[in-house]
Amino acid sequence: MVAGCRTGVVLTVRVVGETGSTNVDLLAAAEAGAEEGLWLRAQRQVAGRGRVGRRWADGDGNLFASTIVRLRPGDPAAPTLTLVAAVALAEAVSVVAPGRAMIKWPNDLLVSGAKLSGILLERGAGDAVVIGFGVNVATHPDLADRPTTSLAAQGVAVTPAALLDLLRERFSHWLERWRGNDLPSVRAAWEAMAHPRGTTLRVRLPDGGQCEGTFDGVNADGALRLVDRDGATTLIHAGDVFA
């Protein structure tokens, strides 16, 4: 167990050899009263999940970690924590792989155009939000619908524990900015590491439909802004993005 602190919050990392899902474990811990600042890292995760119930591969040597945020009166809308998490992870990865990390809406991180990691936010009991990070550090799966990579495949040597230390520091920084009513700075940092504005994107919607347009950043609640050929803006709240 590793402990640290930031103003008013004790940061603790618990490490387990194997678990089903770090998110599931912290959702239970939050319901039992665990405080904000707790992190759980598993050396192996056998039932990890991505968005919409997708399985997250449990490759040896990868990072599987989750943390708890306790919402407070006056905090921005909970879904915007996705922006905080993505910026923090992108900055952490950029320390070990400078200039290669790019955020893909809503919560993927790409390196050299291939998927490196994913983020999953889940609302727990009461004021708890659990945020899970899965990062391909040593290995990566082969997916039929998108290229994938790992830090090792990119020639980057880093341990899951060392990457988590970087992530914890950046997450703490951006959470304080978010909580200090500085969501515009969080959005600006997110957009600076995302697709360039004007990039043509195709979105596969949850109902099976598709739409296409040019990227115009995100709005105040984190929705994707997509501009069509007529100049009309569509807000996308859920879907898979392809460039």
Image (cartoon, rainbow, N blue to C red):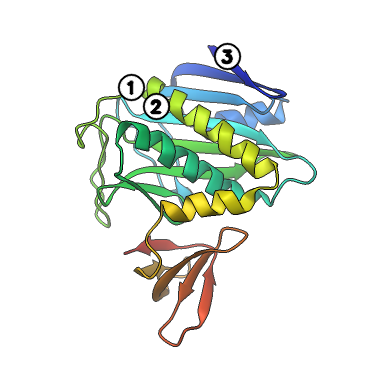
Pointer 1 or 3: first along the chain:
3
Question: Residue 148: image x %, image y %?
Answer: 26, 46
Name the residue: 31% across, 64% down: 243
SS class, disc 2: helix
Q: What residue did someone put label 1 on?
A: 159
Say left or right for 80 vs 236.
Answer: right
Q: What residue did someone put label 2 on?
A: 163
The total number of labels drawn is 3
SS class, disc 1: loop
Q: Are marks 1 and 2 in contact (CB under 8 Å)?
A: yes
Q: Which mark is residue 3?
A: 3
Residue 52 visible: no
- Residue 48 or residue 66, whichever sits in front: 66
SS class, disc 3: strand
Question: Residue 49: image x %, image y %?
Answer: 45, 41
Residue 169 visible: yes
